[in-house]
DNA sequence: ATGCCTTTGTGAACGCGTGCACAAAGATGG
DNA sequence: CCATCTTTGTGCACGCGTTCACAAAGGCAT
């Protein structure tokens, strides 16, 4: 139990900035960086919002949490806003990151250029497989799990990425936390349990696909407006052996019925 | 403008099931599958909730949208629930998927076993690089972009995964949509614009890291409880040359001030 | 200087999601 | 058949996030 608090109750009242806003700041920053590279001096909330794919009122409200950085009748100064958001997100400093589990995914992550584009720097690659030790991936030698604590300590790493198989994830997580890491990005399909004060974010491809499949099914099913009697199979197994009245009207279960 | 509707206004009234619940169903399903493999016959909402890392009341409410599948005083039948959730998510049928952009990430995705574990099947791998054509990745030959429409059509693919560089993503997206795809999972760091009726979900590593960095910075700053006057730099560029009253207390801008 | 026109910043209403707390349902034991 | 105990299903309240709509702010032209 105590499978680790999710969400961020924000310790109570953080200094402002709703979580939903924080999640959008990187989006704005990306759009602003693109404008900056094209030497666009200012943007209106309307333009920037459409570039970021959000509602303009939402964007203005988001920015209002950072302060009043716009000029009425004109818009926002691109460079200045880039700096303000970067600072707010903590991107003015660089963040050493360790990646644990250098398999297919871990190697792809290590090779990912977008890592360094913001203030993130791959400090070390860690894997339990001894045959990988020393092998260079993306120009960095893979180190054995034994080195984990030392690496984290020496480089002052506070962000860890887990790309190991699901079975090893919790164990790796525990070690990362014990080593002093307080933020984890988890690619393994497992719920991680962490102590208070440690943030976990997860990226789960399988979940995303399942959500898409749900909507896809709905779209397909819309053609057949048989709203009433398509779904309800109406046969909860209830008492394990007592009930089993009949097979139920749902039939055609693909061999997954309760034994 | 019209950078593509985000969210899912659910076409108006979908048949129930809040989006937040849909997003958790795969989580429950994963936990239930694990229980099923251990031949556990029933679970209480409390147990299952902790395994999935959510609140038990939330879980019960989520299940209530699917119908009354529990037995009071006992809990939920694992197998039956697995089936019900699978069916609700559309996992009883198999979903052919195309992956476009077989680079570091695309190849990792193609090799990913978790794909097939649910009803997803990699129908084709597509890349614009002619030198990749025919090369087998994860046992499947990479096909050239020219084949895209044919592949989608022949296999009845409705879900596409974009793993190309950001610059090519919108273009690839447009082609996928034109070919008949209505659900897209986007790994490229770009906002995709799609017509109504097409669902887009994104996975953005960089955004996740930036969110972690934000909280990390906050944790570090908590030591100094100078709540009031740490943040407000109070120097929006405002009128380009007119304002500039003084440099403000923030100082130390790392050479990023507006010209 | 003055008025017009654009765009910000935000008050307020609304809807969704969350979690509490409890009555009802049902199993289980006597 | 009844009492007791467990666990579901949900009414309700609350808080967060979204969106509308508009007054105030400020640039710009005359
Ligand atoms: N490949 C993908 O596209 C993809 C997509 C989504 C999720 N995932 C998840 O990401 C994880 C990694 O996927 P993958 O395809 O790279 O798997 P992989 O098997 O290719 O790589 C896993 C690596 O982790 C290492 N490892 C195992 N136990 C370890 C431990 N205790 N400490 C350190 N390293 C350890 C292994 O030596 C191996 O190199 C899995 O959990 C997978 O479910 C992968
Ligand atoms: N590698 C990662 O870990 C990672 C993480 C997060 C996001 N991303 C994003 O995922 C995308 C792919 O990353 P990557 O590291 O695999 O890049 P990559 O350069 O290794 O691979 C890109 C592939 O896309 C192909 N391609 C280019 N244009 C195409 C087009 N128009 N049609 C079809 N194929 C085309 C290229 O030939 C190449 O094979 C990028 O947008 C990147 O920002 C990658």
Image: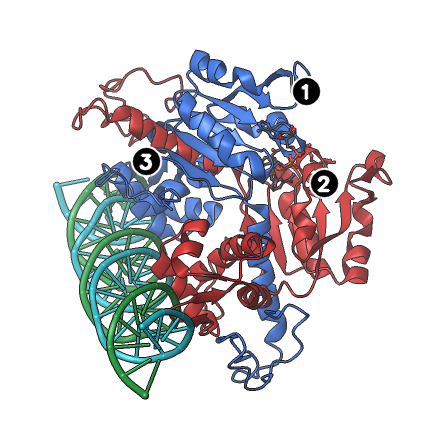
Chain colours: A red, B blue, C green, D cyan
Tell me where residue A198 sits by quadrant.
Answer: bottom right
In the image, residue A72 sits, relative to residue B188, either above or below, namely below
| Residues tagged by mark 3 and mark 2 found on one chain of the structure | no
Where does label 2 land, which residue? A111
Write down the chain letter for disc 3: B
- Quarter of the image containing the C terminus of chain A? top left
Is tag 1's residue or tag 3's residue first in the polypeptide sequence?
1
Q: Secondary structure at mark 2?
A: helix
Q: Is residue A230 left or right of residue B8?
A: left
Ligand 2 within 8 Å of disc 2? The answer is: yes
Q: CA distance from mark 1 to mark 3?
A: 34 Å
On the image, the x and y values in percent for residue C21 come to: 26, 64
Q: CA distance from mark 1 to mark 2?
A: 19 Å
Query: Which quadrant of the render holds ligand 2?
Result: top right
Write down the chain letter for disc 1: B
Where does label 3 land, which residue? B196
Q: Secondary structure at mark 1?
A: helix
Q: CA distance from mark 3 to mark 2?
A: 35 Å
Q: Within 10 angstroms of label 3, few (less than 14), some, or many (20 or more) residues?
A: few
Q: Within 10 angstroms of label 1, few (less than 14), some, or many (20 or more) residues?
A: some
Q: Which mark is on residue B132? A: 1
Ligand 2 within 8 Å of disc 1? The answer is: yes
| Residues tagged by mark 1 and mark 2 found on one chain of the structure | no
**Looking at the image, do the residues carrying marks 1 and 3 touch, with CB atoms under 8 Å apart?**
no
Q: Is residue B184 left or right of residue A251?
A: right
In the image, residue B196 sits, relative to residue A113, either above or below, namely above
Kindly tell me whether residue A236 is visible in this rendering: yes
In the image, residue A235 sits, relative to residue A96, either above or below, namely above
Tell me where residue A105 sits by quadrant.
Answer: top right
**Looking at the image, do the residues carrying marks 1 and 2 touch, with CB atoms under 8 Å apart?**
no
Q: Is residue B157 left or right of residue A90?
A: left
Residue visible at 17% across and 28% down?
A: A227
């Amino acid at each position: 139990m105590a499978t680790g608090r999710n969400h961020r109750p924000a310790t109570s009242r953080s200094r402002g900035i709703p979580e939903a806003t924080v999640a959008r700041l990187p989006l704005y920053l990306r759009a602003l960086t693109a404008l900056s590279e094209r030497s666009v001096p200012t943007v209106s909330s309307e333009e920037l919002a459409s570039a970021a794919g959000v509602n303009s009122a939402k964007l203005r409200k988001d920015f209002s949490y950072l302060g009043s950085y716009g000029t009425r009748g004109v818009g926002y100064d691109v460079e200045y806003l880039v700096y303000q958001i970067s600072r707010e997100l903590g991107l003015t400093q660089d963040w050493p990151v360790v990646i644990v589990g250098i398999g297919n995914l871990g190697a792809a992550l290590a090779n990912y250029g977008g890592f360094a584009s913001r203030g993130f720097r791959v400090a070390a690659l860690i894997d339990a497989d001894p045959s990988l030790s020393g092998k260079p991936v993306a120009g960095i030698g893979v180190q054995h799990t034994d080195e984990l604590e030392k690496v984290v300590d020496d480089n002052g790493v506070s962000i860890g990425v887990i790309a190991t198989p699901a079975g090893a994830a919790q164990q790796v997580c525990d070690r990362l936390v014990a080593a002093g890491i307080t933020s984890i990005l988890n690619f393994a399909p497992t719920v991680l349990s962490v102590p208070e004060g440690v943030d976990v974010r997860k990226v789960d491809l399988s979940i995303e696909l399942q959500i898409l499949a749900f909507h896809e099914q709905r779209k397909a099913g819309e053609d057949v407006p048989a709203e009433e009697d398509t779904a309800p199979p109406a046969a909860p197994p209830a008492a394990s052996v007592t009930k089993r009245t009949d097979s139920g009207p749902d039939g055609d279960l693909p061999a997954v019925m309760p034994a």
